[in-house]
Amino acid sequence: MSRPPLRDYPVLADKKVLLIDRFQATREARAAVLRSHGVEVHEAEEIPTARFLWQPHVYDLVMLDVRRYSPAEALEFYEQIRAADPRQRIVFLIGPPKYVSRTWPGDVAAGDVSRGQWGETVKHFLTAA
């Protein structure tokens, strides 16, 4: 039994996302995919810009590519948002999109991120969340 295409999931329609990624190519690709599914996307290249754009109760989701910033800077931004709006949903993008299977949301395939610097970064963000 095949799942309906992602565009048929109403959970995405009319949502507002703040996407923060310093690397233009991945930011634009992610934004294009989200927009193609009816999501309103506001993009920020830098965390200070994201701070300026973000307001409590405006965004359904904040997506932050933590690979592009220092862990301290990303955690500080996360903590500021959580202090202002504890219910704000925040996603830490910790790797390339290959971690999501082609059959998402039915199946999710995560690569082994337990080794090296990425493993430590992931642990820091999991502890904060």
Image: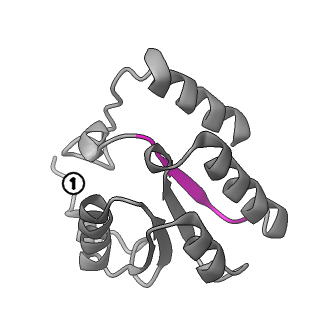
How packed mark 1 is, by other alpha carbons closer than 10 Å (few <14, some 14-19, many 20 or more), is few
* Residue 77 on image: x %, y %: 68, 58
Say which of 107 and 45 sits in front.
Answer: 45
- Position of 120 relative to 42 (above/below): above
Coloration mode: one colour
Classify residue 98 as left or right of residue 85. left
Say which of 27 and 86 sits in front.
Answer: 27
Q: Residue furthest right?
A: 83
| Residue found 28% across the figure and 48% down from its top | 104
For the question of whether residue 114 can be seen, the reply is: no
In magenta stretch: residue 90 = yes
* Residue 14 on image: x %, y %: 43, 85
- Position of 128 relative to 63 (above/below): above
Q: Residue furthest top?
A: 115
| Residue found 42% across the figure and 23% down from its top | 113
Residue 31 occupies quadrant? bottom left
Classify residue 121 as left or right of residue 112. right
User: Which residue is under mark 1?
Assistant: 3
- Position of 117 relative to 58 (above/below): above
Classify residue 31 as left or right of residue 94. left
Q: Which residues are magenta?
A: 87-94
* Residue 95 on image: x %, y %: 37, 40
For the question of whether residue 128 can be seen, the reply is: yes
Task: Inspect the image, locate mark 1, and give the three-letter code of the amino acid beneath it.
Answer: Arg
